Image (cartoon, rainbow, N blue to C red):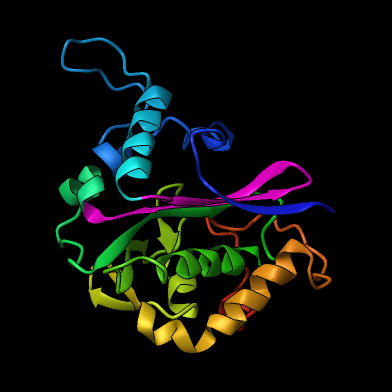
Amino acid sequence: MGRKLTSLTLDNVADLPAPCRSCTLWELGSRPGYLDADGTAQDGARTKDEWLSAVLLDWGSCGRLLYVDGSIAGFALYAPPEYAEGAQAAMASPVSDDAVLLLTARILPGYGGGGLGRVLMQSVVKDLTRRRGVRAVEVFGDAQGHENRCLVPTGFLTAVGFRTVQAHPRYPRLRLDLRSVLSWRDDVEVAVERWLGAIRPGRIIPDKGAGPIGVSPREELSPD
């Protein structure tokens, strides 16, 4: 089984599944099908490409993609809060100045339950520990854990070390301090190498009922 973990770029952004490919809800506060100021229909994919191009130029990589046998299996998008106008407008509490915002993360149906959600998040943390001035990653989670393409269930987030910094009955803001995970950076390296095939990985067990991040209750309670 071929596996690949790579950064999001303009060359592979088209691999994002619909409707995420053309949705800029977090980035700019708009969804596919919205109208521009002049009344014309938005080209969501083009708008997302423009947003991605600006972030790549100014800040660098802002996403990770997971592939299995050449097919997209999961993805995560993240950026400094100033590049997420939609999140700033939609959420009551602001993201901390020293944090990067995790916009969304998802393991696609059929790939959940095998630990890929955890590996995806570990890869994000690994990237952010290299960024100057970034001390944490924050995210608006879904406390009810419902299927939602834009939000990550808080059950998964707390299982991988996030803690609530702004309570909300449905959309709390959670934070993961990067310094708190420096002690398990070696585990991150092993997990990524394992997933890439340097060490023989465990069998992926499809889980059609998985949520956006594709974790099972067992995965939430223990590392892969």
Q: How many marks?
A: 0
Q: Using the image, determine if residue 77 lies above or below residue 219.
A: above
Would you say residue 41 sits in the magenta stretch?
Answer: no
- In the image: residue 86, left or right of residue 208: left
- 74 above or below 12? below
What quarter of the picture does the C terminus occupy?
bottom right
Left or right of 77 on screen, residue 54: left
Q: Position of residue 204 (x, y in %)?
A: 78, 62
Query: Which residue is rendered at x = 84% and y = 71% of the image?
Result: 200
- Do we see residue 171 in this rendering? no
Left or right, 117 with reference to 57: right
**Residue at image coords 71%, 51%:** 110
| Residue 70 percent location from the top left of the image | 75, 42
Residue 101 percent across, percent down from the top left:
31, 59
Q: Residue furthest bottom?
A: 183
Q: Which of these two is toward me, 105 or 78?
A: 78
Residue in the picture at 64% in, 56% down: 209
Out of 186 and 103, give the one closest to the viewer: 186
Relative image position of residue 143 (x, y in whole percent): 37, 67
For the point 65% across and 68% down, which residue is it? 192
Which quarter of the picture shows residue 44? top left
Residue 191 versus residue 34: which sits nearer the camera? 191
Asked if one can make out residue 116 in the rendered structure from this viewpoint, the answer is yes
Quarter of the image that includes the N terminus = bottom right
Specify the segment rendered in magenta. Answer: 60-81
Q: Main secondary structure of the magenta part?
A: strand
